[in-house]
Image (cartoon, grey):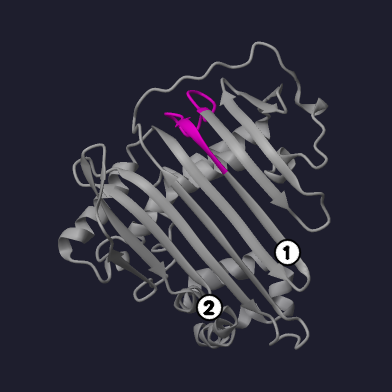
């Protein structure tokens, strides 16, 4: 399921350029023609039902006190999305080659190796250490897929409907052009002002209501259900300094001819200072980087499921990379 969430991220990230209808806040800093290219790419990617990833790389590092985490992976993949989000297993095909991975997690033995994953015809297969394992998707898996693809295919994160003002929160710059298979690919880098985003989120009455509902009785105990928008703004001003140094950037390579996204990168740097709550708490720091090439838009891909495989429950999940992936 985590692999499919990655697909959802790849499909959903372009929506960063369409936070709201009308004036697009992500276009701040761009010429009108570049803004049209950026928003046009988001619309074009909604029509993509299949694509390939010739290569991708992922890294996650973090420290808190004496604990540290270091996870990395690289590989490739092919994806065909379901035509109908309400019937997610029909037509869905996922083939991911995790050529190499390494994971150093506190309390666990270091892990490294490679994994091949296949999702097709309502089945999930995994090749670990040269041995195939498989199982049918459960109803919970199907529902998770319905929620995942149903959300990304709408083309909106719903920030505008929540009344969240993203003006001044996101801005985009035009990078250097590259050539991909004879086509000019334009680069756009969208940056998120994390402190400003926190203020916008907490200043939204709708977001405050959602937060209160999510916390249930805890919200009442803390008095959050009685907080005014002004109170939420004051809270944001208090919490924003805790995230000083935290950055979020999304880079997109957009084809000048086909308007498709041909490359995508997500870079997050986290700095969370907890000393305002406890002087001895210290801080949490970390970085996450995802970079991928995208091609084969709307092409047909096939994968051959293994003829023989062992039940997935026979796979020893202790210290196994699939366990780290949430499979």
Q: Residue at x 65, y 52 (%)?
A: 71
> Foreground: 38 or 60?
60
Quarter of the image for the C terminus: give it. Answer: top right
> Foreground: 316 or 225?
316
In the image, residue 258 lies at what x, y percent?
Answer: 22, 40
Is residue 84 located in the magenta-colored stretch of the structure? Answer: yes
Question: Depth-wise, is mark 2 or mark 1 nearer the camera?
Answer: 1
Residue at disc 1, secondary structure = strand
The outermost residue toward the left is 33
In the image, residue 296 lies at what x, y percent?
Answer: 35, 31
Query: Is any part of residue 327 visible from this angle?
Result: no
Most prominent secondary structure in the magenta stretch? loop
Whole-number angstrom distance, CA of label 2 to CA of label 1 = 19 Å
Q: Residue at x 26, y 59 (%)?
A: 176
In the image, residue 104 lies at what x, y percent?
Answer: 73, 53
* Residue 298 relative to residue 195: left or right: left
Q: Earlier in the sequence, mark 2 or mark 1?
A: 1
The region drawn magenta spans 74-93
Is residue 214 located in the magenta-colored stretch of the structure? Answer: no
Q: Is residue 285 above or below residue 295?
A: below
Label 1 sits on residue:
68
Q: Is residue 160 above or below residue 306?
A: below
**Disc 1 packing (10 Å; few <14; some 14–19; many ≥20):** some
Q: Residue at x 62, y 29 (%)?
A: 116
């Amino acid at each position: 399921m985590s692999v499919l969430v990655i697909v959802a991220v790849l499909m959903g990230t372009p929506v960063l350029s369409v936070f709201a209808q009308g004036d697009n806040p992500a276009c701040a800093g761009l010429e009108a023609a570049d803004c049209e290219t950026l928003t046009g790419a988001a619309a074009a990617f909604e029509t993509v039902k299949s694509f390939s990833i010739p290569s991708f790389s992922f890294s996650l590092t973090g420290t808190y006190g004496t604990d540290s985490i270091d996870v990395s992976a690289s590989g490739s993949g092919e994806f065909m999305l379901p035509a109908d989000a309400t019937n997610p297993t029909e037509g869905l095909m996922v083939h991911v080659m995790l050529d190499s991975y390494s994971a150093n997690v506190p309390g666990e033995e270091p892990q490294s190796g490679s994994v091949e994953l296949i999702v097709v015809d309502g089945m999930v297969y995994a090749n670990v250490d040269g041995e195939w394992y498989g199982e049918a998707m459960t109803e919970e898996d199907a529902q998770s897929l319905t929620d995942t693809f149903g959300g990304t295919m709408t083309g909106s994160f719903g920030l505008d409907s929540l009344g969240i003002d993203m003006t001044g929160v996101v801005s985009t710059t035009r990078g250097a052009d590259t050539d991909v298979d004879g086509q000019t690919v334009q680069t756009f880098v969208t940056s998120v002002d994390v402190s400003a985003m926190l203020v916008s989120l907490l200043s939204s009455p709708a977001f405050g209501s959602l937060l209160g509902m999510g916390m249930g009785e805890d919200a009442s105990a803390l008095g959050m259900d009685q907080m005014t928008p002004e109170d939420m703004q004051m809270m944001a001003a208090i919490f924003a300094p805790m995230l000083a140094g935290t950055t979020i950037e999304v880079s997109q390579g957009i084809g000048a001819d086909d308007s498709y996204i041909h490359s995508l990168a997500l870079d997050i740097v986290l700095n969370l200072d907890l000393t305002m709550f406890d002087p001895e708490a210290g801080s949490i720091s970390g970085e996450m980087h995802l970079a991928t090439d995208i091609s084969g838009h709307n092409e047909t891909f096939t994968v051959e499921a293994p003829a023989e495989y062992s039940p997935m429950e026979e796979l020893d999940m202790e210290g196994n990379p699939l366990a780290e992936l949430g499979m």
